[in-house]
Amino acid sequence: MKWIIAHGDTDGICCAAIALSAFKKAKLFFSHPTGLIDDLKRVDGDVIICDIALSGNYLDMVMKEIGRIASDGHKIMYVDHHPLPVKFDGEDFPGEFENSLTSCAAVLTYKKLEGLVPKDMSRVAIYGAIGDYLDRTYEAEKLLKYWEKRGLYFECGMLIQAIESGGRNYDFKREIAYFLSNNKIPCSDEGLVKKAVSAAIIEEDMRKRIKDLVKVVGNIAYVIDLDFSLGKSAVYANAFTEAVVGIGAESRKGFIEMSLRTQSEAVDLNRILAKLTEKIGGSGGGHPKAAGARIPTEKFHQFITELDNSIIENLKMYNVEY
């Protein structure tokens, strides 16, 4: 592979590291569902794409670029674990397509490239699984049998904290991916350890701030513009309230970026966001219990209101008595 395109979270970085272990000279870029179209336009060779959801809003444009790459005679490998758009047809995909809703992308990438990478890279796959809360899945637990669990979780905890401390610094994410691809453990890098410790201290402070600053609207608890991990903000907003959905959000160039989390079996965030964000001129999706969205700033309060209405409808349907 000449190109590697991956998501910039822990799971995506671990995918990138595994792919780099197999394709050491590949160019590595980090992307996301809304930015994938522009990133694909740069591709002029074989490419592996990992952990990037196919958005229904941009599917036609993404497939057009993928078709262009394939028509130029290049190989395409797409590895992902997000729910697929309704109109996506895997049989028409001009390359190798690997998708599973029961594994993280890093585990899928490791299994796909097994034989091309050292077996020790399985622990990087497990890091990705832990980072995406998918370490108790069948495939992850199979790999976990070859490792001392407690030490591996210790290493992964430091890795996740260090990644979170880097925010959107893609050069830093790239450094971590190359570091992991060389079969090195996080605690062997003094700089990474220092970042992880610092991030853990900041998280404890932010956790207490979120408890005081969280706002509740109906079934939704949210915090905005805290200069902290959106995913963790959503988790703590959810944890400190009785809300069904927690949101961590931030303002950014005319848009509100957010992460959403829920523990409710009645709510499918991916399905709700796919419809709601398209309706108000944004984009969104992910997993049933963990998803992201991007909407125009002026639509934020409308978004909260309509999301709450959708949650109410889902709860009614789930709790109906016969």
Image: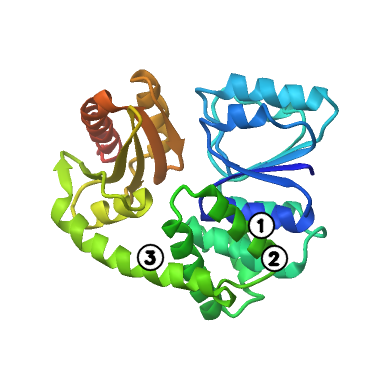
Tag 3: Cα neighbours inside 10 Å, few (<14), some, or many (≥20)? Answer: many
Q: Nearer the viewer, mark 2 or mark 1?
A: 1
Q: Which residue is mark 2?
A: 121
Q: Which residue is mark 3?
A: 199
Asked whether the residues under the numbered discs 2 and 1 touch, taking CB atoms below 8 Å apart as contact, a structural biologist would say: yes
Q: Amino acid at mark 2?
A: Met
Residue in view at x 63 percent, y 68 percent: 123
Q: Amino acid at mark 3?
A: Ala
Task: Give coordinates of residue 228: x percent, y percent.
Answer: 32, 53
Tag 1: Cα neighbours inside 10 Å, few (<14), some, or many (≥20)? Answer: many
SS of the residue at dot 1?
helix
Q: Quadrant of the C terminus?
A: top left
Q: Quadrant of residue 299?
A: top left
Mark 2 to mark 1 CA distance (whole Å): 9 Å
Mark 3 to mark 1 CA distance (whole Å): 22 Å
Q: Nearer the viewer, mark 3 or mark 2?
A: 3
> Would residue 198 be found to the left or right of residue 220 on screen?
right
SS of the residue at dot 2?
helix
> Would residue 26 be found to the left or right of residue 108 on screen?
right
Q: Is residue 280 above or below residue 51?
A: above
Q: Which residue is mark 1?
A: 17
Residue in view at x 72 percent, y 32 percent: 43
Q: Quadrant of residue 270?
A: top left
